[in-house]
Amino acid sequence: MVREENWRGYNPNIPYDTIAVYGTGSNEIISYKIVKAEQYSVKDGSWTYFDPATGRIMKIEKYDRGRLIEAPKPEDVTTDQPKPKTVPPEVLEYQKKNSGKKVKVRDGSTSN
């Protein structure tokens, strides 16, 4: 997985949208205008980015209706290398004991 996304979409049951009309220089709403709503979707909520090779989280961005409200800080982004995988001694013993042998392994498939 590369990215986990969240979107806010247009509601098809509401065909019109209300937009505020502001006065010049006063930041005061003078009136409202009703317009036909367009179909759209925008980034909303948390977007998590993963390293495809390791699956580790690389960064998290937070959006509010298409506007980036929280970007990752440089110190929050992980750049260190992943820890090497440790193999339990039992697995090493099994691999040593069965190396070169053909071992039937159950994989959960239903066919013979």
Image (spheres, rainbow, N blue to C red):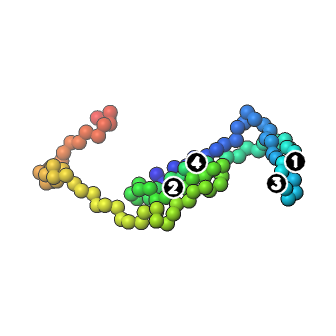
Task: Name the amino acid type tagged 2.
Answer: Ile
Judge left or right: residue 86 versus residue 38: left
Task: Name the amino acid type tagged 1.
Answer: Ile
Judge left or right: residue 26 versus residue 6: right
Query: Which label was assigned to residue 30?
Result: 1
Residue 70 point in image, percent of width and height: 57, 57
Residue 42 point in image, percent of width and height: 66, 49
The residue tagged 3 is 27
Q: Earlier in the sequence, mark 4 or mark 3?
A: 3
Name the residue rendered at 34%, 61% in the picture: 82
Name the secondary structure under disc 2. Answer: strand
How many angstroms separate mark 1 from mark 3 (CA)?
9 Å
Residue 109 point in image, percent of width and height: 32, 36
The residue tagged 4 is 45
Nearer mark to the viewer, of 1 and 2 = 1
Name the residue at the left extreme. 97
Query: Mark 2 and mark 1 in contact (Cβ < 8 Å)?
Result: no
Task: Name the amino acid type tagged 4.
Answer: Gly
